[in-house]
Each structure stands twice: as structure tokens, then as C-alpha cells.
Image (cartoon, rainbow, N blue to C red):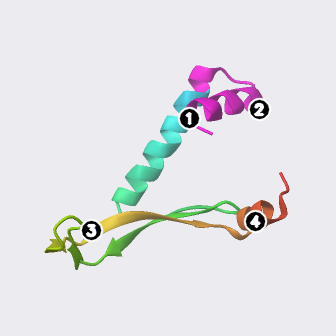
Amino acid sequence: MNKADLIDKLSKDAAITKAQANAAIDSFTDTVIASLKKGDRVTLVGFGTFSVSERAARNGRNPQTGAVIKIKARKVPKFKAGKEFSTRIASGKK
């Protein structure tokens, strides 16, 4: 499913226009990103938690030359599925 498919499904399920569904999805993603940038977590009970994880600096290898390269430390987004989400996926329920 891509964003266009999600917009179609959301607009039908919520009985709103596609433009409203698109605005809702954009608002949701913008809000999650802004919260994570501030260092906050976003928890949706039953769905999961979005957070930021610190990845330490490390040495890697250039696959073409085999040379050692330094990879900088950085922050990466992380999602941990909630219990209900995981259970529904495993059981195949809607």
C-alpha cells in the first residue's frame, strides 16, 4: 500500500474527501517528525511507539575497495509495535 492507496482507504472509511484525508496524513507525519526532532516519543496505545535511537560512531568498510571508513554517530527513527498491533498481525484479524 502506498500513500495514494492509504488516502483512498481513509477517505472512504471516514467519509471525508481525498484532500481532507491527505491533509490528515500529512499532519500526522509532520507532527510525529516534529516530536521526534524535539526528542519526544509518540505513543499510540494499541498501535506502537515512535522514538529516536542514538547510533554510535563506528568503523565500516568500503565494499569496492575494502578500505576502512569512519561512520559518524547519528540519530535514527525507531518504531516498536504495540501488543495489540502485534497480536492482530500474528492472528490475521482485522
Pointer 2 or 3: first along the chain: 2
From the image, tell me which residue sits under label 2: 13
Pointer 3 or 1: first along the chain: 1
Compute the Cα span from label 2 to label 3: 39 Å
Amino acid type, label 4: Glu
Amino acid type, label 1: Lys
Is residue 20 found left or right of 32 in the rendered image? Answer: right
**CB atoms of marks 2 and 1 within 8 Å:** no
Q: Residue 46 placed where, x, y %?
A: 71, 62
**CB atoms of marks 4 and 3 within 8 Å:** no
**CB atoms of marks 1 and 4 within 8 Å:** no
Pointer 2 or 1: first along the chain: 1
From the image, tell me which residue sits under label 3: 74
Q: Quick check: 56 above or below 30? A: below
Compute the Cα span from label 2 to label 1: 15 Å
Compute the Cα span from label 4 to label 2: 21 Å
At label 4, counting other C-alpha atoms closer than 10 Å, the crowd grade (few under 14, some 14-19, many 20 or more) is: few
Q: Judging from the image, what secondary structure is the residue with disc 4 in?
A: helix
